[in-house]
Amino acid sequence: MGGGQDMGASANAEPMLPEGEPLRELPRLANESTVPGSFKARLTAEPATARFAEGLDTPILAYNGTNPGPLIEVKEGDRVEIEFNNNIPGEESTIHWHGMPVPADQDGNPMDPVASGSSRTYAFDLPEGSAAAYWYHPHPHGKTAAQVYRGLAGAFLVKPKSDPIPAEYGDTILMLTDLRLATDGTMPASTMADLMNGRVGDHVLVNGQKNPKLSVGEGAKRRFRLYNATNARFLKLAFDGALMTVIGSDGGLLEAPVAAKGILLSPAERLELIVSFEKPGPITLYTLEYDRGWMGPGRPADAGLTLLTVDVSDSPAQPAPELPRKLRTIAALGAPAANRRFVFTETMGMGGMSMGSGGMSMDSHGMQMGGEDMSMGAGGMKMEFLINDASFDMNRIDVVSKAGEVELWEVVNQADMDHPFHVHGTQFQVVERERGGKVSRADYLSWKDTVNVARGETVRLLLRQDRPGPCMYHCHILEHEQLGMMGIVNVQA
Ligand code: C2O
Ligand code: CU
Ligand code: CU
């Protein structure tokens, strides 16, 4: 589909999203503090209207009226104070600082809701060495999935005091979200298929735009920070005809650059890339096939979607220095003092459930779909996403850890779908993966806060929590998190 369209606007036409517009920069959250080393601002979550498709208004939720939310940019070592106003009618909310080294009581956990119409201030200090591409999103009990796909998510960049990546490469955030629009421009409520698989939209957007355009000179090198901020979409990506080099993961730079052909970003993961645009002509960022496991109808046709088009002109780019061979040092976490095991399972009781074309529908009482209320009664069916046979309970501590102690976590996926595993409050190191009896060690050290655990796979990771308090761990398919695939590790001082 090209940018120009002259389809007759019929009442039932699929909404057309304009393509090929210049890539927007994310609006920045202004610092209201004049004190060096301090960042102060306000974020208000409230209903807003977006114009994704020609002639159609889409009611969304937005932070400070923008979708995606405003970019927060600070420096490592900064003190951050953000006042949060919840103006979402009738719903509690929180702001969770995904991946950031934030004290548990400032991390927007479901145990600390902010009621509709009220506000609170989140305050934390960002330690040295915490530079990375993080993000923020709501985390209220039972409402996270809907608040995020309705528009609440933003990028949070912590910049280093000195950056080894040449400034000539720029620093471009590509925040990937996805969107489903009904013919009237509204976002339809989630179906049963959405709850099972996670909600996957019809359009993948970059900074809120469909297939926007970026222009560079021949031979340019560009730094991109890719975010998978979708609820549930697995994005296997490549730049067609350009060289990709991975330089960073969720928790900041790698030790050394790594050449890549295709990259998999599971929900909530981030990746930093350098892309070299050697020859003139259009270069696209597009999706490759990836099988993440799917139940029932509605599987998205994901291969070959164009997410971004880079126009490489034939006038040469400004010369820029080479990428350094060494980016930083990452200390290995060392021998664990404790071993833990987390087993993911799904249980589907099929009694009373029938498959419809648009998803699943219930023919017995016991399940409410209206308003995204996913509670399920004892009646018809039971659909559960479990960790160690348990569904999330806010009043239950699942694991007790000691602050400062290294632990080995073994995450076992015995389910029929991939589940991206995320832990709050820290960054971990993936040590090895095991699938079908085959063990593979990680090729290089990196800091991660989310890792995909494929169907039938076991991922072993080392982690250390340094701040006491209750931290969540969960599947970052947000519908699964909401349906129980979450636990609490209480970190003791
Ligand atoms: Cu990005 Cu507990 O979440
Ligand atoms: Cu998180
Ligand atoms: Cu999951």
Image: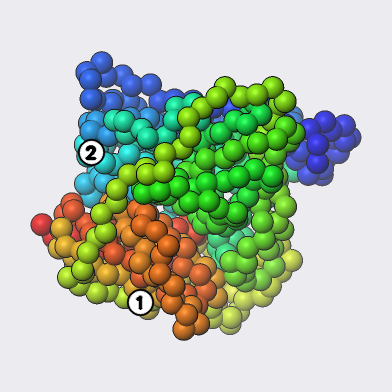
Q: Nearer the viewer, mark 2 or mark 1?
A: 2
Looking at the picture, which amino acid does disc 2 mark?
Glu
Instruction: Name the residue at 26% across, 46% down.
Output: 101
Image marks 2 and 1: residues in contact by CB distance under 8 Å: no
The reply, left or right, for residue 285 in relation to residue 34 is right
Q: Residues within 10 Å of mark 2 (few under 14, many from 20)?
A: few
Q: How many marks?
A: 2
Q: Quadrant of residue 368?
A: bottom right
Q: Which mark is residue 196?
A: none
Looking at the picture, which amino acid does disc 1 mark?
Asn
The reply, left or right, for residue 444 in relation to residue 286 is left
Work out whether residue 336 or residue 207 is closer to the camera in this orientation and state it: 336
Q: Is residue 419 visible?
A: yes
Q: Which mark is residue 128?
A: 2
Instruction: Name the residue at 65% across, 36% down.
Output: 278
In the rendered image, the residue lying farthest to the left is 493
The reply, left or right, for residue 276 in relation to residue 450 is right
**Residue 212 in the image: x percent, y percent?**
67, 33
Instruction: Name the residue at 47% across, 63% down.
Output: 452
**N-terminal label among 2 and 1:** 2
The image quadrant where one finds the C terminus is bottom left
The residue wearing badge 1 is 388
Q: Is residue 403 above or below residue 230?
A: below
Q: Is residue 458 above or below residue 189?
A: below
Work out whether residue 177 or residue 58 is closer to the camera in this orientation and state it: 177
The scheme the figure's colours follow is: rainbow
Secondary element at image label 1: loop
**Residue 421 in the image: x percent, y percent?**
41, 62
Q: Is residue 214 visible?
A: no
In the rendered image, the residue lying farthest to the top is 34
Find the distance from the CA under tag 2 to the CA under tag 1: 36 Å
